[in-house]
Amino acid sequence: MPLPLYLLSVAVFAMATSEFMLAGLLPAVAADLHVPLGQAGWLTSAFAAGMAIGAPLLAALARSWPRRPTFIGFLVLFLSAHIAGALTTSFVILIATRIVAAVATAGFLAMALRTAADLAGPQRTGRAVSILLAGTTVATVAGVPAGSWMGELLGWRATFWAVGLLCVPAVVGVACGGRARVVRAEVVSLRDEIAQLGRYRLALTMTAAAMLNAATFATFTYLAPLVTDVAELAPRWVSGALVLFGAGSFVGVTVAGRPSDLRPHAVVAVCGPLLVLGWAALGLLAALPVAVLALAFLTGALSFAVGGTMIARVLYEAADAPTMAGSYATASLNVGATVGPLFAGATLSTSLGATAPAWVSAALVVAALGGFALLSLHADAAPQGEALDAHARRAGGASTVDAVVEVAHDPDTARVDVDLRRHQDGLPAEDRVGVDFDLR
């Protein structure tokens, strides 16, 4: 994979640390700013809401902006928001800084996903997404636990300062990183790109991805009280649980990277039901410390395996919206990250107490799997070969398919070996590969 893709992943690490870090800091923030724990959880939802709204808005505005200066501008805005957040004593202002940081993150991630797909090519989109999301998983392994530990020793504000400092090497890396050839896709009007949202398959895939991420954030946001109040572990074990969740997420997104390109429905069909069982087991066995720690790893792995696969599918389904596809994926993630903590926070006062978010997560995964399963029952009325044509345009090759490939209908994807010289005049002669495309 191209070097710039890994540099973007470094920046995603800093931003993901900020997005996830409040999971270990909420009790301290609530106590310092004198708000209930459930209300402090609004900080997570505010960040996610800012990303959900900011991603499509900034993607539309930045369609023709030069990528490198735009990436740097988003990082500087992100840094400024964290400085303001570290200095404020107002909960309302803190929420406002989280929204600003989220908008900067949304713009950056939407453009990064678009760039990753362009750099990797249509046959490797899933693997490119897995590299970008690796920045997120490393954040949960190292950045978030370190932030939780720093907040315990020095106060939650120190973590905000630390995340701001993480932006400095990210800015340097993006500014000084090597260049890569990004082939320009054909020009598509903004109206036509937005019109893609009306396609049943894209809308359904985005909805399923949103519900899956809602499940992840529902429990992740309130993991600290589950570890300390239910499992009755010492506060330092919150960082340990976060490390295990992050390690699992890294394993999940890495292992599922290639299969998410080849057999996405198989990945979801195997890992999805296991994830439901994992969240249910956490709700039942939360009083057992060993079970909590083991399930933190398991649910992290399964959540990111399924979630990464669904996000890759959003990019595939949005192939005819080349500049907006990344924002659609980002919006899906963060609609889920907005509603998940809200649903979970509303259940904390029930008889289930701190275990309630795990049951909310299980229910949301069931809903996500139901939506994703409907994709197998519906195929857009498009000629065979049209999806390959769309992927050819995304790779910058000719937008006309020379021949129709006859294959048996499969609700999943079909593996077809074709000579790309026959379909994409813009690719070198040696690029003879297997193409994975959807029958839509």
Image: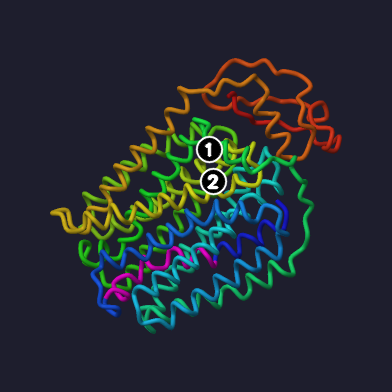
Instruction: State the residue at coordinates (66%, 68%).
Output: 72
Residues at discs 1 and 2 in contact (Cβ within 8 Å): yes
The residue at the far left in this view is 351
403 in relation to 317, above or below? above
| Residue 390 image offset from top left, x and y in percent | 68, 32
| Residue at x-position 31% and y-position 61% | 223
Instruction: Locate residue 294: give its quadrant.
Output: bottom left
Mark 1 residue type: Leu
Residue 29 among magenta residues: yes
Residue position marked by numbered label 2 in the rendering:
328
Q: Between 307 and 269, which is closer to the camera in this rendering?
A: 307
The answer to which quarter of the image holds residue 22 is bottom left
Q: Which corner quadrant holds the C terminus? A: top right
Q: Crowdedness of circle 2 by 10 Å Cα count: few (<14), some, many (20+)?
A: many
Specify the principal SS of the magenta part.
Answer: helix
Q: Is residue 216 above or below residue 440?
A: below
Three-letter amino acid code at disc 2? Tyr
What are the residue bounds of the magenta stretch? Answer: 14-30
Q: Which mark, by number, is residue 211?
A: none
